[in-house]
Amino acid sequence: MKRTVAKLEVRLDSWLREFGPKGRESVAADSVEQLLDELEGRYPKLRFKLRDETGQLRKYVRVFVDGKDVSGTSGVSTGLEGARSVDILHSIAGG
Amino acid sequence: MARKEPVRILVGTRKGTYVVTGDARRRRWKVGPVAHEGNEVYHVVADPRHPGDLYAAVNNPFFGPEVQRSRDGGRKWKEIATPLNPLRKDRAFQMNEASPSTPVPRPLNNLWHIEPGLASEPETLYLGADPHLLFRSTDLGRSWEPIASINEHPARKDWAPGFGGACLHTILVDPRDARRLYIGLSAVGTFRSEDGGASWRPRNRGVETPFLPEKFPETGQCVHHVALDAEDPDTFYRQDHGGIYVSRDRMDSWTRIGKALGGDFGFGVASPPSAPGRAYFVPLNDRARVIGGGHFQVLEWNDRRRKWRRLVRPGAFPGDFGVQREGIATDALDPPGIYVGTTTGQLFASPDAGRSWSLVPFQFPAIHSVSAASPASP
């Protein structure tokens, strides 16, 4: 039986909206990696902005799944089963 | 370049790109347009083959590197193709420090230098990047070809980074022969290719490595920057971690010329097309990495007379100034203008080969690179 993947609501911060969706985006994905693949397919300018060419999140990109930061833990392999929202932000750094 | 033509100085900074336009006398300066807000811009260069075209090596601290181009002298910019690390798929290339036997992939890091090709190759560009990567475009940056002879060089595993990273920061093309190329990498040294980049030979003979047990190895030199003599393209002026050197034989051998200065550490060097045989350096205190003596200074090397000359009256500009590898530039006018950007955001300008100096009246962010262009240059 074909499994149905629930749709999530994705939001990008104001800097990233230059490359991606301007508002909330509905995406169906099993994992952060799949979600980013889907987003990059829809918005090619996002390619290599969030992840480098090794597939890992860039150092100062943060991904929150239902409000929890997964960037420094499971990263792109984080599963999204049961999740409802993903926020993608650049971290507060620099000077 | 015509004598009275206005000069544009392209300034890459820690916070963006600034275009600075001078009047015909190179005494008054207008700052703007400004672009790439918030980005580290390691190099900005004009393409003399296509008037108005500028290229910038933009390194976004959050979202990675981008090659950007302007076709209108810096008012509007657009990201063009940015290469990926070509070794990502076919071979691991960075050893895991915690487990040295385990290779790990490494992405393209910062972009360091963009070099337009010769007029005979009007669509060729070269790009140097970290980690020790060289690319060539033959379609003005619509696509990039990795230069495998460097990017997959068998000795790469022994190549160490400098403090600024594993940067390939110097790319020079022999103006008589587009197939003869020279590159500089930190902390690896200089290489020459006679076949358009198909193969390379290290060219560091005579350059000392005071930071290694072996004093004159074939590679391992921390070259900081190299300038080519426009009239005699067999001659090169080199600012190395280990001092200031000249080569008069296409880098086959190097002679240290800076020892007489009592301190010849530094980063930048430039040689003006209108005054062959001259090169400008800004030696720094090798511990503080600022100009010694507590004031701004530029030194001229005259390779014909084999003599050094100080160009700035001591004390004229008191302060402790640092200058990075792309921080010195000359224009193509006669007498040459000399431009020096500092790590504290001052842009010094001389319109007369160093006889007089002034500060461009604008406080820039920390300056990474300075280059000169003219709106109407061919």
Image: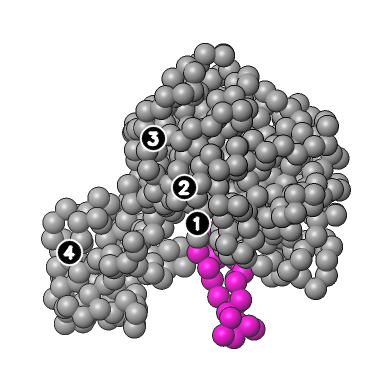
Which residue in the structure is indicated by mark 2?
B367
Q: Which residues are magenta?
A: B84-108
- Chain under numbered label 4: A
Q: Amino acid at mark 4?
A: Arg
- Residue pointed to by mark 1: B110
- How far apart marks 4 and 2 lie (CA) works out to 35 Å
Whole-percent x and y of residue A88? 24, 67
Question: For the residues tagged 3 and 2, is the chain the same?
Answer: yes
| Amino acid marked by disc 1 | Asn
Is B300 placed left or right of B13 in the picture?
Answer: right
- The three-letter code of the residue at mark 2 reads Ile
Which image quarter holds the N terminus of chain B? top right
Please give the residue where the numbered disc 3 appears in the rendered image.
Answer: B361
Q: Position of residue B156 (x, y in %)?
A: 69, 65
Is disc 4 surrounded by few (<14), some (14 to 19) or many (20+) residues within 10 Å? many
Q: Nearer the viewer, mark 1 or mark 2?
A: 2
Return the residue at label 4.
A11
Q: Residue furthest front?
A: B315
Between disc 3 and disc 2, whose residue precedes? 3
Task: Give the mark nearest the N terminus, 1 or 3.
Answer: 1
Q: Residues within 10 Å of mark 3 (few under 14, many from 20)?
A: few
Q: Position of residue B357 (x, y in %)?
A: 53, 32
Q: CA distance from mark 3 to mark 2?
A: 15 Å
Q: Nearer the viewer, residue B103 or B299?
A: B299
